[in-house]
Image (cartoon, rainbow, N blue to C red):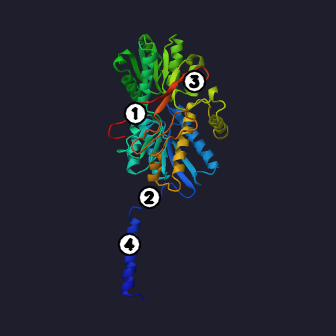
Amino acid sequence: MKTRIEWLSAAFFALCLGSILAAPQPARAAGVTDTEIRIGNIMPYTGPLAAFASIGRAEAAYFDMINERGGINGRKIRFISRDDSSNPKTAVEHTRDLVEQERVHLMFGSFGTPGNLETRTYLNERNIPQLFVASGDEEWAHPKRFPWTMGWQPTFRAEGRIYANYIQAAYPSRKIAVLWQNDQFGRDLFRGLEEGLGITANMIVADIAVDADMSIDTQVDILKNSGAEVLVLNCAPPIAARAIRKAAELGWHPVLLLVNAAASIANALRPAGLQNSVGVISTSFLKDASDTTWKNDPAIKEWLAFMDKYYPDGDKDDSNAIFGYAAAETLVQVLTQCGDDLSRENIMRQAASLRNYRSTVAFPGITINTSPTDFHPIEQMRLVQFDGNSWQPIGDVIESAFLGVPGDK
């Protein structure tokens, strides 16, 4: 027979159990186990910016290679990449699902400015790393306000200034036309171009904003009729390809400057017609595997072998593929530096302590440096020119003037 104390104890236990079951349950452990690291990613595998999808495919292939070699300190990478078709709303939905259902430990290399802006607050409020964002916007370098978000590539605004400096040095009295993408990417680079030109910005005699999926024949005709002798193409690869081809059809042969994000032989120059693309100027910080300068380079030989084995459907002339490879390589460096402490705090600590790290496929002289107050990993570029087969470096490495926000580096 149970005593009154025993009955009370049983009743108290039942009451406590009921309270526990009724209360909100804590989230499952984040995506790190003794054998696995879960990493989330958002990429435009479909839609108007699908040309950039090879970034995500190359990253997935790189992680496959790392896993085959034993992983990182014994842990395999589970890379979960979702398609947002460049729709910010879809990016938010997928990011929430990756965090709350797939339990990814961090987000890595997600593409584009709008979607990453929409998910930044959500990830920072939950102390989830949003690492090496695939966008050159300056918004990824505010370590005080958004300590869990970090970019990777040089900023669009700095790139615009580089083009301005080149125009001033090589074509100081030429009229300029700009075809720019009607989003934050396009605006940032255009702003850098105007800032770099300074008082000579009045040499921009025409500029037209375009959407990523529109026809641009009429716009190119308008730009030609402006009398411009320099054309800056600040848009996605498909539009850049159509613009180069259309200019050639019109018999218009301006000096062509092509934004780095569109400087893919596979996705822009080949569709435009290689013969129409000879002489195009762009910027780069990564080697071009088709450039014979690197034919005996061990890193490029390894890259080509990687493509053959792990990404055989990829195009070796696609600069986005080598971009994904280099970004994934950087993340592996960070995770390797973490050792057995793969806490989110330590991942960000290691990401913010890269010292003269150099991707194997980066140009000589291009290094990655970060600190707790500097979330701009790559701040250097080189001007390159297309010779009909590959991109050839011209000039020296350019330190892309830091364009941060005072007091919030």
Q: How far from the left and from the top, in percent, is residue 326?
A: 55, 38
Crowd rating for badge 3 (residues with CA inside 10 Å; few <14, some 14–19, many 20+) = many
**Where does label 1 land, which residue?**
402
Amino acid of disc 2: Ala
**Up/down of 202 relative to 383, above or below:** above
Number of the label disc, if any, that sits on residue 16 = 4
Residue 277 x %, y %: 56, 19
Circle 2 residues within 10 Å: few <14, some 14–19, many ≥20: few
- Describe the element under mark 1 as helix, strand or loop: loop
Which residue shows up at 40% across the image and 33% down it? 402
Residue 319 in picture, x, y percent from top left:
56, 31
Please, what is the three-letter code of the amino acid marked with disc 4?
Answer: Cys
Q: Looking at the image, can residue 290 be seen?
A: no
Pointer 4 or 2: first along the chain: 4
Q: CA distance from mark 3 to mark 2?
A: 51 Å
Of callouts 1 and 3, which one flags the residue occurring earlier in the amino acid sequence? Answer: 3
- Residue 392: mark: 3
Q: Amino acid at mark 1?
A: Phe
Q: Residue most toward the left?
A: 407
Q: Does residue 277 sit above or below 330 in this rendering? A: above
